[in-house]
């Protein structure tokens, strides 16, 4: 890949996934995150687990209307 | 509504007390404060049951009343729950346990299997039981700040102010909470079949 310097690690993606619940990620962060997950099977798996966690947490806490 | 269904609803409200209390306890980490908040919420619910519409589930409605009661207390600047101990805080900021999940290049060390995503009530309740156990295992302050954000939906500034932590430390605590919950569920929840 051409821009190695901009590539983030799996560890970095976990920070972005957490930060995204506190603030809107910057366009660069969103791009890096999407780019990394697209090419990383491990992160696709972790990302699906976080999706289930956040979706069920919302139900557990009685917030069916919450968007994220 | 006739008196029989009023009574049925009152019974149903009362039957959800344990769920309310356990969540209040997770949030407040103080038994007396959790009992008070639960009692306030139940009294408000029983008084206002005419306002309950079937469009939302009873549990959702009660949790929103409880949430409102706790947020209201916080906003009135009545500090609820024990103050944070700086030494305890330092332990709760330790990221070492999570570093082992990654290799030296920052890559996940092991594959992440797909979880069963519960849709049916029975399976969902089972998931909630595991989730609650995982939340209970979080360090005290970590679960308090995590639920302040995810349940009470306080702003990060409000959480920092209430608990007395710096924004950078709050970010680490919330990261740890999410990482630990994912890890705990991965250990204890079913794989997709």
Image: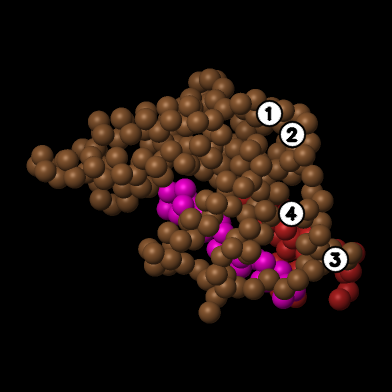
Using the numbered discs, state the Cα–Cα distance from disc 3 to disc 4 in whole angstroms.
Answer: 16 Å
Residue annotated with mark 1: B84
The chain coloured brown carries which letter?
B
Q: Are marks 3 and 4 on the same chain?
A: no
Using the numbered discs, state the Cα–Cα distance from disc 2 to disc 4 in whole angstroms.
Answer: 23 Å
> B91 or A22: nearer the eye?
B91
Nearer the camera: disc 2 or disc 4 = 2
Q: Are marks 2 and 4 on the same chain?
A: no
Residue annotated with mark 3: B103
Residue at 58% over, 52% down: B134
Using the numbered discs, state the Cα–Cα distance from disc 1 to disc 4 in whole angstroms.
Answer: 24 Å
- Circles 3 and 1: CB atoms closer than 8 Å: no
Q: Which percent across, then down, holds residue B54? A: 25, 50
Identify the secondary structure beneath mark 2. helix
Q: Which percent across, then down, holds residue B131? A: 54, 55
Using the numbered discs, state the Cα–Cα distance from disc 2 to disc 1 in whole angstroms.
Answer: 7 Å
Q: Which residues are magenta?
A: A40-68
Which class describes the residues within 10 Å of circle 3: few (<14), some (14-19), or many (20+)? few
> B186 or A34: nearer the eye?
B186
Identify the secondary structure beneath mark 1. loop
Task: Kindly identify which numbered label has been placed on residue B88.
Answer: 2
* Chain letter of the residue carrying label 3: B
* Chain letter of the residue carrying label 4: A
């Amino acid at each position: 890949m051409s821009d190695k310097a901009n590539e983030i690690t799996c560890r970095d993606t976990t920070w972005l996934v957490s930060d995204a619940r506190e603030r809107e990620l910057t366009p660069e962060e969103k791009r890096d995150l999407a780019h990394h997950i697209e090419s990383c099977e491990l992160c696709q798996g972790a990302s699906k687990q976080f999706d289930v966690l956040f979706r069920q947490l919302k139900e557990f806490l009685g917030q069916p209307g919450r968007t994220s | 509504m006739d008196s029989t269904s009023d009574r049925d609803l009152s019974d149903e409200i009362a039957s959800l007390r344990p769920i309310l209390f356990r969540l209040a306890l997770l949030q407040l980490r103080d038994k007396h404060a959790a009992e008070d908040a639960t009692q306030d919420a139940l009294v408000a619910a029983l008084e206002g049951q005419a306002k309950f519409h079937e469009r939302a589930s009873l549990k959702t409605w009660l949790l929103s009343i409880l949430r409102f009661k706790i947020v209201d207390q916080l906003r009135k600047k009545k500090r609820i729950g024990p103050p944070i101990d700086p030494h305890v805080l330092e332990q709760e900021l330790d990221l070492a346990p999570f570093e082992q999940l990654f290799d030296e290049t920052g890559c996940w060390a092991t594959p992440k299997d797909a979880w069963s995503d519960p849709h049916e009530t029975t399976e969902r309740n089972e998931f909630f039981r595991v989730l609650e156990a995982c939340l209970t295992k979080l360090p005290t302050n970590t679960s308090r700040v995590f639920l302040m954000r995810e349940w009470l939906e306080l702003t990060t500034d409000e959480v920092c102010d209430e608990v007395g932590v710096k924004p950078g430390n709050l970010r680490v605590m919330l990261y740890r909470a999410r990482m630990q919950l994912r890890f705990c569920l991965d250990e204890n929840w079913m794989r997709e079949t």
